[in-house]
Image (tube, coloured by chain):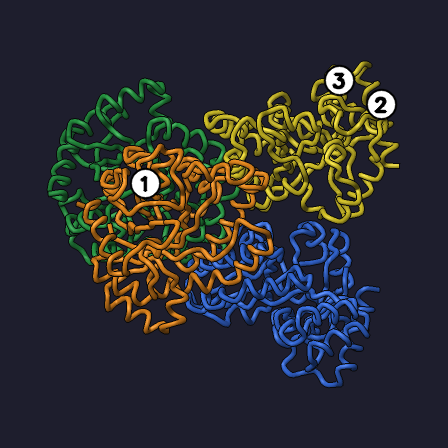
Chain colours: A green, B blue, C yellow, D orange
Amino acid sequence: MIRGLSRAGIGSVSDEQFITLAAKYGFGAVDLEAEALIASHGLEGAKELLEQHQMLIGSIGLNVEWRGSEEQFLEGLKGLAASASAASSLGCKSCCTYILPATDQNPALFMAQTVCRLRIISEVLGAYGIKLGLEFVGPHHLRTAWKNPFIWTVHDTLTLIDAIAQPNVGLLVDAYHCYTTGYTADDIRKQLLPEQIVHVHINDAYDLPVEQLLDNDRLYPGEGVIDLQGFVQSLGDIGYRGVVAQEVITPAISAGSPDDLFQRSKLGFDKVFS
Amino acid sequence: MIRGLSRAGIGSVSDEQFITLAAKYGFGAVDLEAEALIASHGLEGAKELLEQHQMLIGSIGLNVEWRGSEEQFLEGLKGLAASASAASSLGCKSCCTYILPATDQNPALFMAQTVCRLRIISEVLGAYGIKLGLEFVGPHHLRTAWKNPFIWTVHDTLTLIDAIAQPNVGLLVDAYHCYTTGYTADDIRKQLLPEQIVHVHINDAYDLPVEQLLDNDRLYPGEGVIDLQGFVQSLGDIGYRGVVAQEVITPAISAGSPDDLFQRSKLGFDKVFS
Amino acid sequence: MIRGLSRAGIGSVSDEQFITLAAKYGFGAVDLEAEALIASHGLEGAKELLEQHQMLIGSIGLNVEWRGSEEQFLEGLKGLAASASAASSLGCKSCCTYILPATDQNPALFMAQTVCRLRIISEVLGAYGIKLGLEFVGPHHLRTAWKNPFIWTVHDTLTLIDAIAQPNVGLLVDAYHCYTTGYTADDIRKQLLPEQIVHVHINDAYDLPVEQLLDNDRLYPGEGVIDLQGFVQSLGDIGYRGVVAQEVITPAISAGSPDDLFQRSKLGFDKVFS
Amino acid sequence: MIRGLSRAGIGSVSDEQFITLAAKYGFGAVDLEAEALIASHGLEGAKELLEQHQMLIGSIGLNVEWRGSEEQFLEGLKGLAASASAASSLGCKSCCTYILPATDQNPALFMAQTVCRLRIISEVLGAYGIKLGLEFVGPHHLRTAWKNPFIWTVHDTLTLIDAIAQPNVGLLVDAYHCYTTGYTADDIRKQLLPEQIVHVHINDAYDLPVEQLLDNDRLYPGEGVIDLQGFVQSLGDIGYRGVVAQEVITPAISAGSPDDLFQRSKLGFDKVFS
C-alpha cells in the first residue's frame, strides 16, 4: 500500500508545497486536482514535479455535481473529459465522489437518477483509464440532515455499483465511515475483493458513542479510537495495494505550521502501518 | 392500433376459447402465456390456432419475481429465456410487468436493485427480440399499502428506464393509472414518443374522487368516467400503432357467459375507437 | 417529414445565409454546427435566428475522430459534451457520423474498438437528449479503398447498433447508400421501424452500373436514376416523421449562385415529395 | 494460487473419480460441469463430495454456442441461467469459453455479433455471481484454418472485453496461447492486473518452432519448453490468487491409468510451483 494525503488535515499549502512536503515526510501519493496542477505548471512541469518527488496522484475529485439539478449535472459534465484527460496524463487512475446518506428528493427517484448519471460519468472516466470511487458516508447525524434516508452502508453502495454495471466503478473505503456504520476489519476480510476498492481514506474518531460522531470533526490517524492498524491490515490481507490517503476533516484548520501537520500525519501513519 | 384483450374481464376461458372468442368479437390480439399455449397445443398447433383466427399475442407476462428476494429472482430468471423464446416463436414482441408504488424495503436500495434486475431481464428478452414494458401503478391507496413510497408517475418510470439504459425497455401505459396519476391525453401528446410505449391497457373508473379509486375495482371501457376516446386518440396522434388491450380488474369475476363478456368488451371498444 | 438541407450542394454560404435561404425555399431544417452558430450569434441570437425562420437544426456532425488513434479519440471526446449541449440548447436532437466500408486495421479489432468508442460517445450524447445516427456507406469503390472490408449494409450496421446497446443509437439512412447496396424501398417497409432511423439523406445517382458510382460524385434529388419518391414514401409508410436532408457531394462546388442552388434543391424536393 | 485440473490430460474418469483423485494428488480445484454433478449426486451430495475432498470447482464451461447461428445461440441461452445457478450453488465463480483466431464470416460483423452475444451471456452469469473468462487461442495453424483472421492476442482480447463493457468479464490466460503469441511473463507483470484474469491454464509445448506448434498436441507441464515457472511466478507477482488448471490437449488419450496421469500431473505442478 502507498501512504497518501488529501488536503484535509495538512493546512493551507500550494500544490507544489503539498507535493514537496508529502515527499519530505515519506508519503508516496497526494490527492489533488491534476487539471489545476497542469494549468499552473504546464504538462511537462507537472510531470517533472511529480517525478522529482516520486509522487503519485492518488485520486482526483469528481467535478460534476451529479446530486443536483439536470442543468448542474449537464454543465459539470462538459468539463469531465478534460479533467479525466489531465489526470490520465499525470498517471492518476482514480476519481472519487461521496454519496450523502439522506436526500430531500424522493429517494427511489434520486437513486434512479444517481445510477443514470454515475453510469455516464464512469463511461467518460473509463475512456481515459480512470476508475470512479464511490464513498459511502457513515455519520449518523447526516442520515437525518435531509428529509429522506438514502444509503450509507458498504452493502447498499455495492448494490448501487451493481446497478451502474460498469467495470471501472468501485468503493472509496473510508475508515471513519466504516467505523460509524459498524463495518469491521473482519467484514473487509470476508466480504471485499481488492478490485472492488478504488481508494481508501484513513482518519480517526473521538471516544464518543458512535451515534454522536460528527462528519466534519475527525482526528488524525492514531489519535483516536478507531483500530486503524486492523483496518489497514485487513486491506493488505485481501490484496489491496493502492493508496491509503489521510483525510482529516475538522471544523477549523488545524493549528501548526505545514511542517507540523505533515509531521503529525507521518507519525499517525507510522503508528497505523507499524 | 390493434384491439386487444387481457384475461382480466373476460371470465374463465381456456386459451383456445380466448383466441376464438376474441376473433369472433373483432379483436386482433390477446395477452396470454405463449409458453403455456405451446405446451398445450405444440408449436405448430399454437401457430395454426393464432393464424387461423388472425390473432396476435399482444404481450406475455414477466414470470420473474424481481421484487422479492435474491433467491426468488434467480430462480425465476432460469425460466426467462425459454419464456421469451416461446413468445418470439409465436411472433409476440413484448413482455410486461408492473411496479408497485410503495415498498417495505429502503426505497433507494430497492430502486438500485430494481434497475439491476430489470436490466438483466431486458438483456435476456432483447436477445429474443422482445421488449420489456414497465407499468406504473396509480391508485392512491397502494401508495401507502407498504411502508415507503416508491414511484408511480410516467416521469419517474421514464427515469427508471433511463437508469436501465437498454434499447428495448419502455412503458406500459394503462388508462386507469394515467387517470389516477393525473396524466392526461394532452400529456401523452406533448411528452411521449411512440417508441417509448411497449403496450397499452384500457379500462374505466367509477365516478368517485380519484383518491378513492381502487386498483382492483375497475369498469369496462366506456362504462365509467375516463375519457378513453381522448386517451386512444392521443396515442394515435403521436404515432402509436401497437396493441391496446382491455384489462378490467374486478373484485369478483364479472357476471355473464364468456360470450356476454366478450360482447360487452366489444361494445366498449366500439365506443372508445369510434 | 421535414424537408432539410445539409451544406453539401448549396454552395458556400454563411450559417445565417444558410438558414435564411433554406427558409426562403421552403425547407424546415438545416444541418449545421450548433456550437459554431452560438459562437457567432450568441445563444439568444442563435435561437432567435432559428425561430424567426421557423428553422430546425436537423443534425450536427460528430466532432470526435473515433476511427483513428486512441489519442485522437480522447482528444475529440473532450469537446463532445459542449457540442452536444450546444445542439440541445437549440433544440437539435441528433448527431451523425459515417462508417467507412473498409479499414487498414484488423477489421475485427477495429469493430471491437468502434463498439467501445461509439458506446461512450452515445452515452455522452444521450445525457443531452441527442441521438447518434450511424451512416453506412455504400459505393463499391470505397470497399477496396483500404486494405480490409469492414461493413456497409443496413443489416451489418444494425448488428453494430445491437453491439453498442444504447437506447439512443440508430441509422442515418442515405438514399445513395441504399441504392449502392441494393437496399430498396420495400426493404425499408418490411425491415425498419421509424425509431431505428435517426436521420435521412437524399441525393441522386448517375445512370451507370451501380458498381461504378462514386461516393463523391452525386446528383441533386430528382436529377438521377434513384427512385426517391419510392424511398421517401416507404419512410412515410413506416411512420418516419423526421428530417429528410439533401446531401449532394460533388467533386467541385456546383455552379450557380446560392439562390440558384437552393432553388434547384427545392425543385428536386418538390418532385420527390409530390 | 490453487492447483487445478481440467479433464484434458487425466484420462477417462467419472466426476467422482476426478474429484477423489485430484484430492489424492494434491489438487485443490477441478474444472467440471456443476450441473451434471448435481444431476448425478443431488445438490447436497455434490456439496458433500466437494467438501469432503476440500475441492473447488475452478470453472465450468460455457454451454452456449455463441459462434454459430442465431438459432444455436438462442437455443443455448435457454440453459445458461440454470447452468450458472448450478455453478453458483457449488461455490464456483467462473465460466470460460475460447475464441477461435479465424472465422468464415466477415470478421467485423462477427466481432459485432460476438460483443453482443457475450454481453448478454455475461449479464446472465453476473446475476449468479459468475465471471466470464475469454480464452484467446494462439497456435498459428488455426489462424488460417478459416477464411478470415479474427483475434488471438491479449491486447485484442482486452479490446473485446472493453467493448463488452461488463464488470464480470476477463481473460482466461493459457500458457500455451501466451507462448504461441509471444506473450511473456514480463508482459504479464507489466500489463495485467489480477482482476483482469478469470482463470489460468497451464500446459507445455514441444521443442519446435513456435509457428509449427499444434493446438491439439500439447505436453504436460514441465515436460516441454515453456518457462512455466516464470509464467506462474509472474501471475503471483501481480497478485493473482485464483486457480491454475492443467489443460493438456492431445490427439489421443494419454497412455496410463488414471493414477498414472494424476501422478504425472502432480509432478509437473511440483516442478512448476517449486
Secondary structure of the residue carrying numbered label 3: loop
In x, y percent, where is residue D89?
36, 66
Question: Residue B59, located in which quarter of the rendered image?
Answer: bottom right
In x, y percent, where is residue B13?
70, 81
Tag 1: amino acid? Ala
Q: CA distance from mark 3 to mark 2?
A: 12 Å
D82 and C223: which one is in front? D82
Secondary structure of the residue carrying numbered label 1: loop
Residue hosting label 1: D205
Q: Is residue C204 left or right of residue C89?
A: right
Residue hosting label 2: C263
Mark 1 against mark 3, which lies toward the viewer?
1
Name above or below for residue B1 compared with residue D251: below
Q: Is residue A167 left or right of residue C254?
A: left
In x, y percent, where is residue D234?
25, 39
Name above or below for residue C156 compared with residue D59: above
Q: Is residue D204 left or right of residue A269?
A: right
